[in-house]
């Protein structure tokens, strides 16, 4: 290793934004701002390599201590203050800084260098006793919590007691004598809890704080955040040691956070919050409700103007929205941090589009700026405006969307209930980084404290969760697991609804509406369509699904599952009758009763997708799925016998039981299903195929252009497909001759078994298209039963890094992907006109979509609401290829 530490001060910095991996985002951007001539408090960054070194070896490089002292001297020269000097003390902060922003996940310690002697020097230096002791009590509180591990609420309890004894409501109302008492009480608490004294040696404080901040890379909340956001463990964090500037020196000082554009809507306006006479953690912790930045324009107009100009410079320099932190000390502005601002999907789309119009970025850059997964936020449901709702209270609209769920008051309880398929709303006074796992599984978050830039708001926006923050009308009692509002009491388990776009908290469940695409959203997707070369289709089983798919930009249906149509109350009796039939003739008679219903199903879907291809998969699951459960039926027969029911009824039930027993399989997933069913019971597939082609014929006669494509599931060799293709072609010709009409159609197969992928060259000779069913292909390649794997061992495998991702959510490119690539190559070699796509849900997962583009698939297909995600991911794949 070379140098460990990089110094920064205005117009003097050894680092830059290019060294993000080494200095972390915060350190790199502090250096960049310093080099731009922006006023930043001087300091130095200890690189991520030191974190990695410590993680691997268990100790720091021997030279590190000397380098820290050398860089402290530089700060002392610039500031004219000295670290540990009782008369003129230099105070510093220690903050984390990973290469990717992890807001609130790691630790910070402020005001290091204060002790019983230097605090008196700070009083003389500032002529402000209250400020000095407020800073000291903050240090002891943060140090006790972050470095020594004393629970934060124990310090808060002491503060609450002190405020109660003095008859005040806010921390800022406590006089300096009370703050002196708090320092002593905090030190006693540390001694009582940890059996150690608060260190009076400033250099010991600094050493322990640096250790704690490096160690926070592996705290529980940081690990959870990394898992959720797929941040590699080996990256490590940098540590920034920086001169303290104080926003708590009186009413001419403040601290705040902001964005160069509104991170919720994308509107081009300076957006954020600040607190007069406060330190930074007060704003984000939600202890006091902050003021909007627009108010700063009234209170300190010159400071506001300087802040506006500096932040606009930063946005133009970085060519992206900046999330910044600032402190004003005695009307003097300091920038403490800047980073690319997290934003909602709505804001991301608007900002990307607006920056193209403003000439800041290109269309390709705009497309890369919008995360495909983020688009799901735009597809969130919203409250039906016609619904009658009982609004309980209003808070701040911290993250858009709407959500309904049962109330929970702890993150652990949220996870517990979510694991049992319950939809929950996490209700807290304010969230902390420890709640990250609960926020991740909640439908929405409600807090009674905090502002638009509080922890809950920032994390919810990043995750696309609905959030209402700072709803002060709600009194939360986390111990009793209840909240009160307007005289009403709500307990854990009660339902509430949140509207994160308006800040409303609503009683009970509320009707929701499906989302609509905004003008900016449509424009971004139009740009994506101009770029991408791979098609995007949708999986849709009903005319309504097909309509939604078309609205979302689907270029056809890649999978229409016909089995879902058989479960309707009007048709299930006929399906069961067909299954119970003991001869081919009887089966055919029963199938005929279903045919008109199937024809109407297909007609509706084909009509919605007029002009576009519709791939209809013939019946796939085993027949016993349409019959009652064996054990339930056995119990029912036993009860009928005990009750002395009619013998004919019992006989009919016993006959049904025998048929269920005949159809039962040890492993139905690999049993009598798919094309095996079509070959052994040809009447079933003949009925479906006739219904498809009669629907096509009727629509063609009406002047519609339709393109039905018949897909045979679960083939393992070309002979299976050849037998069924012959049957399908025969029915098509019969229908066209009978109706005296011609329509186009195609016959293909779903490749969902490893053997089919390996023998794709032979199967392709009988197929017009392949569609890889990556859900089943994943199961059969891994030998995993999805339901069993996800419920039992798969989460453990992912946690222990046996597998990096859930292969049912993210395509396994190394194994399953290799089979897809092989099947594609062999199939096209044998049949050059073969069209090839995928139709598993992987077709809407961005990294899987990009893989499909790279290997040369013609299209992907996914659920309707993931179509925009696939369109954007496909465009990004093309842009990334061009950049390489």
Image: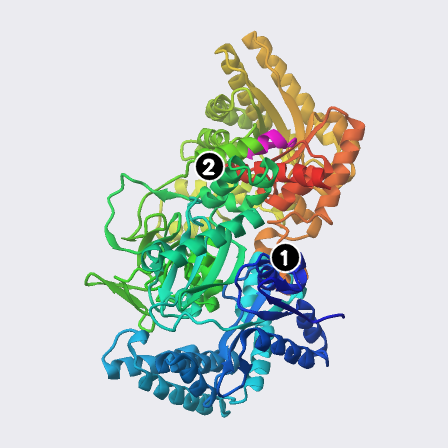
The image shows residue 414 at horizontal and vertical percentages of: 43, 63
Left or right: residue 519 versus residue 241 is left
* Residue 267 visible here: yes
* Residue 419 visible here: no
Identity of the residue drawn at 62% across and 75% down: 74
Identity of the residue drawn at 38% across and 70% down: 278
Rendering quarter of residue 673: top right
Identity of the residue drawn at 59% across and 49% down: 809
Image: 76 above or below 349? below
285, 39: nearer the viewer: 39
The image shows residue 36 at horizontal and vertical percentages of: 58, 56
The image shows residue 421 at horizontal and vertical percentages of: 45, 56
Image: 591 above or below 90? above
Q: Which residues are magenta?
A: 528-540
Left or right: residue 766 versus residue 430 is right
Left or right: residue 638 versus residue 449 is right
- Is the C-beta separation of discs 1 and 2 under 8 Å? no
Query: Mark 1 packing: few (<14 Cα in 10 Å), some, or many (20+)?
Result: many
530 falls in the magenta region: yes
Identity of the residue drawn at 66% across and 57% down: 804
Rendering quarter of residue 693: top right
Give the residue number, with chain letter if any, for mark 2: 567
Image: 774 above or below 240? above
Residue 17 is marked as 1
């Amino acid at each position: 290793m070379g140098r460990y530490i990089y110094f920064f001060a205005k117009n003097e910095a050894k680092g830059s934004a290019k060294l993000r991996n080494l200095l972390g985002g915060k350190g790199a951007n502090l250096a960049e701002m310093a080099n731009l001539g922006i006023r930043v408090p001087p300091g130095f960054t200890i690189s991520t390599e030191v974190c990695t070194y410590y993680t691997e070896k268990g100790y720091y490089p021997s030279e590190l201590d000397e380098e820290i002292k050398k860089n402290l001297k530089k700060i002392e020269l610039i500031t004219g203050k000295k670290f540990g000097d009782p008369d003129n003390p230099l105070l510093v902060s220690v903050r984390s800084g990973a290469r990717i922003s992890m807001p609130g996940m790691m630790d910070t310690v402020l005001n290091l260098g204060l002790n019983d002697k230097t605090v008196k020097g700070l009083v003389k230096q500032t002529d402000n006793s209250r400020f000095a002791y407020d800073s000291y009590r903050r240090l002891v509180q943060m140090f006790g919590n972050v470095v020594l591990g004393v629970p934060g609420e124990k310090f808060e309890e002491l503060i609450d007691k002190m405020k109660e004894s003095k008859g005040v409501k806010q921390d800022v109302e406590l006089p300096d004598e009370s703050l002196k008492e708090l320092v002593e009480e905090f030190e006693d608490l540390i001694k009582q809890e940890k059996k150690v004294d608060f260190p009076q040696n400033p250099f010991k404080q600094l050493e322990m704080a640096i250790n704690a901040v490096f160690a926070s890379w592996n705290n529980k909340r940081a690990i959870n955040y990394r898992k959720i956001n797929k941040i590699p463990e080996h990256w490590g964090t940098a540590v920034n040691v920086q001169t303290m500037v104080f926003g708590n020196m009186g009413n001419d000082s403040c601290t705040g956070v902001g964005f160069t554009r509104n991170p919720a809507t994308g509107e081009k306006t300076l957006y954020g919050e600040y607190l007069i006479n406060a330190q930074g953690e007060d704003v984000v912790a939600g202890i006091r409700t902050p003021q909007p930045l627009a108010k700063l324009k009234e209170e300190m107009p010159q400071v506001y103007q300087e802040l506006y100009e500096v932040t606009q410079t930063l946005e133009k320099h970085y060519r992206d929205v900046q999330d910044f932190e600032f402190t004003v000390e005695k009307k003097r502005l300091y920038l403490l941090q800047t980073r690319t601002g997290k934003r909602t999907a709505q804001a991301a789309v608007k900002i990307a589009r607006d920056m193209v119009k403003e000439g800041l970025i290109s269309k390709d850059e705009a497309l890369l700026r919008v995360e495909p997964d983020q688009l799901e936020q735009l597809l969130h449901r919203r409250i039906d405006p016609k619904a009658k709702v009982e609004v309980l209270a209003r808070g701040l609209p911290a993250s858009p969307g709407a959500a309904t769920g049962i109330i929970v008051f702890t993150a652990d309880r949220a996870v517990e209930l979510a694991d049992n398929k319950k939809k929950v709303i996490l209700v807290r006074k304010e969230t902390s980084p420890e709640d990250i796992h609960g926020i991740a599984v909640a439908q929405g978050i409600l807090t009674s404290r905090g502002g638009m830039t509080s922890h809950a708001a920032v994390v919810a926006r990043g995750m696309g969760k609905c959030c209402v923050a700072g709803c002060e009308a709600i009194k939360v009692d986390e111990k009793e697991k209840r909240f009160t509002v307007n005289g009403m009491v709500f307990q854990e388990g009660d339902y509430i609804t949140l509207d994160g776009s308006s800040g409303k908290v609503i009683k009970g469940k509320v009707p929701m509406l499906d989302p609509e695409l905004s003008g900016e959203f449509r424009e971004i997707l139009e740009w994506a369509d101009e770029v991408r070369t791979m098609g995007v289709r949708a999986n849709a089983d009903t005319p309504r699904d097909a309509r939604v798919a078309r609205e979302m930009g689907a270029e056809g249906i890649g999978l229409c599952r016909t089995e879902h149509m058989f479960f309707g109350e009007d048709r299930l009796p006929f399906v069961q009758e067909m299954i119970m039939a003991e001869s081919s003739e009887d089966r055919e008679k029963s199938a005929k009763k279903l045919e008109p219903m199937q024809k109407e199903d297909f007609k509706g879907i084909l009509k919605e997708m007029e002009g576009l291809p519709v791939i209809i998969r013939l019946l796939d699951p085993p027949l016993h799925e349409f019959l009652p459960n064996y054990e339930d039926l056995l119990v029912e027969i036993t009860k009928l016998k005990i009750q002395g029911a009619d013998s004919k009824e019992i006989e009919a039930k016993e006959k049904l039981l025998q048929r269920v027993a005949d159809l039962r399989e040890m492993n139905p997933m690999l049993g009598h299903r798919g094309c095996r069913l079509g070959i052994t019971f040809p009447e079933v597939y003949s009925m479906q195929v006739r219904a498809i082609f009669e629907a096509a014929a009727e629509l063609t006669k009406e002047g519609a252009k339709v393109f039905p494509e018949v897909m045979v599931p679960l083939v393992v060799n070309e002979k299976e497909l050849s037998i069924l293709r012959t049957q399908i072609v025969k029915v098509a010709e019969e229908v066209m001759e009978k109706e005296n009409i011609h329509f186009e159609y195609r016959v293909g197969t779903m490749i969902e078994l490893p053997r089919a992928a390996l023998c794709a060259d032979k199967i392709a000779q009988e197929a017009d298209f392949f569609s890889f069913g990556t859900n089943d292909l994943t199961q059969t390649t891994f030998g995993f039963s999805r339901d069993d794997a996800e419920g039992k061992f798969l989460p453990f495998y992912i946690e222990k890094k046996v597998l990096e991702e859930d292969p049912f959510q993210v395509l396994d490119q190394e194994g399953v992907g290799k089979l897809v690539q092989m099947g594609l190559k062999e199939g096209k070699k044998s049949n050059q006109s073969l069209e090839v796509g995928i139709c598993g849900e992987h077709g809407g997962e961005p990294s899987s979509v990009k893989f499909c583009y790279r290997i040369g698939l013609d299209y992907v297909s996914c659920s309707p609401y993931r179509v925009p995600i696939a369109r954007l991911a496909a465009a990004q794949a093309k842009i990334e290829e061009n950049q390489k």
